[in-house]
Image (cartoon, rainbow, N blue to C red):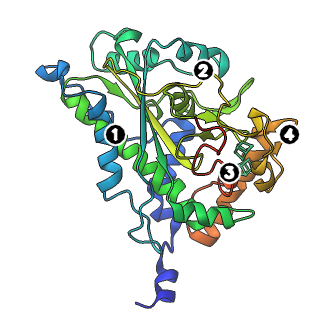
Amino acid sequence: MNREKMRRRYRRFPWLSDIGGIKSAIGELRGIGHPEQPKLRKSSASRYDIRVTEDWFIDAISSRVAHHVENRMEYPFFGERIFDEPLVGFVRGNDPLLLEYKEIIGPHHFTPEEIMAWQAKRNGVPAPAAEELSVVSFVLPISAKTKEDNAASTKWPAERWAQTRMSGEMFSQLIVREIVTNLMKRGILAVAPDVTPMFNKKRYPKAGWASPWSHRHMAYAAGLGTFGMQDFLITPKGAAHRCGSFVVHRRLTPNRKRPDDIHAWCLHYQGKECLKCAGRCPVGAITREHAHDKEACYRHVAQSTRHCLKNYRLFIYGCGLCSTGVPCESRIPAGLRK
Ligand code: SF4
Ligand code: SF4
């Protein structure tokens, strides 16, 4: 089949072919339409399985990113990897910062204990105490080609970026689901908060657009990154990534040191000349005076759906221009690395 014919046939009916993407978007906004939660195998003797260690989680995530067939782009980028080697970190369920998030993000944000109580109740077992829980957090760095394309864009997300937003998010949820199911079969309670019916992204009076479980804040708590001017998390592998997290009934030891300063790896916040992210924003949503205007950003991101549908035949929204073509795109900026 020649290329032009293939292009015409590709996703001719994106409203139908993107059922997965649409379901994922509805799940994000309304907390519905997710696959059934896995059941806890109560008779399992492996609840105290010593093999389920920090290294087990690092390997479970890294090996999926390296080998999973779903970590792949679609036409016209067949076979390219969506994500590169991940970063994985841990935070204990009783870390005081997780309770402080009720103040910092808002009272709607779950603690690991609250979300796990829901999973325990569903399975008819006692709810574990906060100190018996951990959050496993991970960062999936976006591939070099995708970053390059988005860095060359000036208004709307590049096609590779839009595919990453859609297929990459589904991949991230899929691998978490596989790991959570594996743990539940071993008799270890686990839950992915963003695929429960309580998860719904909405506009809160104080916080603006927010969700009751922030992967980014979990990643900060786990020492994986700090926040930039554009509110992206700047990690040792940069700000162009997707992140995920889940809660597990396991006492895991944090493997990274969390900087006290939540902006430790952003040049501007450290008093150095930069604001390159502001220059990249097509709608002026980042300014020296007001940092990141979430509402202006949201309006532009929402409008990108039309562009993605018309040009890429993808029912998805996105932008990320401020995280590409900037000094913090793929690393902690020089001068801030310890
Ligand atoms: S581009 Fe510069 S100012 Fe913006 S988040 Fe990155 S380091 Fe901070
Ligand atoms: S993601 Fe938001 S802040 Fe960043 S460039 Fe796009 S519209 Fe601007």
Q: Is residue 76 above or below residue 55?
A: below
Q: Is residue 150 something that shows in the picture?
A: yes
Query: What is the spatial separation of the Cα atoms under label 2 and label 4, in whole angstroms?
Result: 29 Å
Disc 4 on helix, strand or loop? loop
- The residue depicted at 41 percent of the width and 11 percent of the height is 130
Q: Is ligand 1 less than 8 Å from the beta carbon at label 3?
A: yes
Q: SS class of the residue under badge 1?
A: helix
> SS at mark 3?
loop
Residue 58's x, y, as percent? 33, 37
In this view, the mark in front (3 or 2): 3
Q: Secondary structure at mark 2?
A: loop
- On residue 288, the disc is 4
The disc, 2 or 4, on the residue closer to the chain's N-terminal end is: 2
237 horizontally vs 322: left or right: left
315 horizontally vs 50: left or right:
right
Which residue is drawn at the image coordinates 29% and 22% (left, top)? 189
Residue named by callout 2: 108
Question: Does residue 179 appear to the left or right of 244 in the view shown?
Answer: left
How far, Cα to Cα, is label 4 from label 3?
17 Å
Q: Residue at x 58, y 57 (%)?
A: 316
* Residue matched to label 3: 327
Which of disc 3 and disc 1 is earlier in sequence? 1
Q: Which mark is residue 142?
A: none
Residue at mark 1: 177
* Number of residues whose C-alpha sits closer than 10 Å to that of mark 4, classed few (under 14), some (14–19) or many (20 or more): few
Q: Position of residue 54 (x, y in %)?
A: 31, 28
Q: Estimate the spatial distance between the alpha carbons at disc 1 and disc 3, rounded to whole Å.
A: 34 Å
Residue 259 vs 149, above or below: the answer is above
Q: Is residue 16 left or right of residue 210?
A: left
